[in-house]
Every structure is written in C-alpha cells, then in structure tokens.
Image: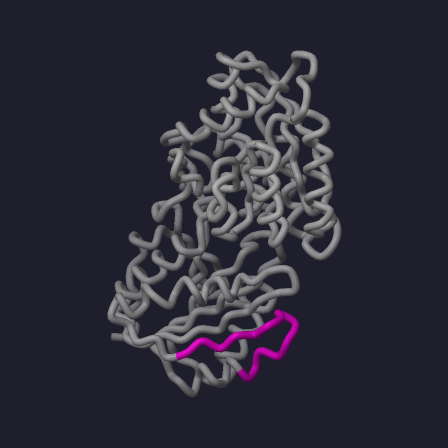
Amino acid sequence: MSAARAFGPVRIGVVLSTSGAKANVGVAELKAVDLLPRQAGALAIDYVVVDDASNADRTLAKIKSLEADHVDAIIGPATNPAGMTAADAAGALALPTIVQSPNDGAVRGPALRHEWSFKTVPDVTVLANALVDELKREHVVTFGMIAIDDFFDSYGTRWTGSMLVPIPLAGIRYLSTYSVARSTYDLDQPAAAVVRDAPDAALVAGPSAAAARAHASLRRHGFKGLIYHAWPEYGTVNIRAEDFEGARVLVGLAAQPGRQSASEAQEFASTYQARSGSPPSAAASALHDAALLLAKAAPAAAVEATPGTMAFRRKLRDALENIQNVAGMQGVYRLSPSHHSCLGRDSIGVATVDEGRWVYAPLEARPAIAGAAH
C-alpha cells in the first residue's frame, strides 16, 4: 500500500465526467467543487479533481493515479458503469469511496466493495418502494412500464427488476414492461403498446431526454392514466416543464425547494444558484453531501491516525460508518457497518407538472388527484 505523505491536509480525490458522453452530469458537478467544505475541525481539506471522460477504463486509471498521490478518500463518479468501477477499486485499494451512481450494486456484492464504498443517492429499490406506496395511495389497480436503457447505463433494466416483486405484493396487477435497448431508439411503438394495455398508471424509467419523447408519445396515442417518471440525471439537463405536462417525477430532496433544513445545505444551494444561474443538480447535490460526510468523519479519524496513511483511511472508513442524522442536500444520512447506502424513503419526493410549472412535495404530503384511477 501507499507510503505516508508528509503530514498535511486531508486530500480527497474527486472523479468527474466533465467530457465525453456524460459531460452534462460532470459539468454540473464541477460547479460545486469550489463550494465544498475546506475545513473539518482543525483539519484543512484539499480536493484533487480529475476527469474520467465518461469512460470506465479511464475511471480506474484515474483512481489508481489518485491513490498513488496519497489521497485519503475518493468522491465520485456519478455515472454508470464508472460508479461500479470506482466501487470495485475502493475495495481493491482499501480507499474510502463515496459514489453518486444510482446503481445499487455500488455498495453491495463482494465483501471488499461493500466495506469501502458508500453512496449518496437513493437506491433504485428505495425509489421503487416509494413509488409503490404512491400507487397504492392513488388506488392504482393495473400498472405498465417503459424501461429505457442507454449506451452507458442499464437504468431502465434495473427499474424493471426492482418493480417485479413489490408491485404484485401491493395487490397491483403488473400488465407488462416494454424495454428499449437504447434511448436513441423509436419510442412510439412501446408507447402505443402501453396505450393498448390501458393500465391505470405507467412508469417511464430512463434518461430524461428519451423520457420526454416517451411521455409525448403516450399522450399522442391517447393515454389517459397517470404517468410517472424516474430518470438518473434529474436536474442535469435542460428539462422543460411543458415537455412533461401532467407527469409525476420521482426526485430527491435536493430538487424540492425549501426542504433543506441544514444550514450547510441551504448555503450550498443558494450559492450554487447565484453562481451558475440554476439550482444544483442531483449529482452536484450528491457530490456536496459526500464531501460533507467526509468532513464530518475526518476529525474522528484524525484522533487516532495521521492523514496520508493507511491507518487514517481505515479510521475514516470507520468514522463514516458511525455517522448518524447528518442533514445534507439529498436527505438525512444514517450509516452503519452494514448500511453504506446512505438515504432512505424520507428523502424521496415527487415533482408534478401543472400548467407548465414544476410543483414539488414529499410523496406523503401531496394530495391525491381528483379522478385518479380507482
């Protein structure tokens, strides 16, 4: 393992995708880096930012380079499959890593991966169970789905797997799933098939640009039921409310104005918007929260070890596992040695589109729509 560097600040590597196919995600995150915590008690924090060019092979090379440069932890990346690559590297290098990838596997699977990787975005399974609760509240009886994968991500497929069990357990009849292998493919046929099935509610799971096309196609074919959306990059692209009229979109706490109770989160949100002209994206918010968690954990680790050493990495990992009730942009974080996916059901809300405006609320607080399926 790496030799210790001379005593100095805590150094955190930040792996972003600021170029390549997922640059829209990484550029939004990059705007957040200057706003991350620079002090943790008496410890200074330095960030070393690298670009993996939206390439998982390059992600691994960048992480190895950062480890050789004696960073104490890694934040990122926010994309798939790079997130899984980073999680595996965390275990192999014994390097605390907090990813922003939505892939549940980033904190599950092989023991070493689970021991060293953490996540600051909700698991798809958490989102799926939140959606099922919402469907029950709306008295939905039948359900259909369009699952859209992308060139670098099987997000739609993961949603399909996550819905297979909770939907029938809730007493809802799962009519069908229409899978689309690439977001660039034609979405008219699966939309028409959903309309023929006529479920009370349909879910479109996939990248937002493709989801907008699927939404328009469902409406064009005369679909009258509720349309829910789940996409991995909420807030990172120019999403026009008018493209989603009548939609209900699952979102994290960061996309719900006024729900950040912690002063750090409020300050980050307001400063980010003032500097960039737009609210922080979900990925930028998750990046902020990862840095916040490390800043909370670092002083405890430094009591028994020196930054730049393997001993400090282990103590930092242990301190992360003991974080409780830290409020960030995405929600309230509660960790343990067996629970490295940091967000639960209370971090999930819904954005509805009403006459061209986004309206936000926690799922449990939003009134049911009159005339919804019964």
Q: Residue at x 55, y 32 (%)?
A: 96
Instruction: Name the quadrant containing residue 214.
Output: bottom right
- Residue 345, image x and y in percent? 35, 48
- Residue 230, image x and y in percent? 48, 61
Q: In the displayed structure, would residue 200 be above or below residue 122?
A: below
Instruction: Name the quadrant containing residue 371.
Output: bottom left
Q: Residue at x 70, y 36 (%)?
A: 64
- Residue 175, image x and y in percent? 37, 79
Instruction: Indicate whether residue 184 is drawn in magenta.
Output: yes
Residue 3 located left or right of residue 293:
right
Which of 316/35 is in front?
A: 316
Which of 216/8 is in front?
A: 8
Which of 357/92 is in front?
A: 92
Q: Residue furthest bottom?
A: 196
Span of residues in magenta: 176-189
Instruction: Name the quadrant containing residue 22.
Output: bottom right
Q: In the displayed structure, would residue 286 be above or below residue 292?
A: below
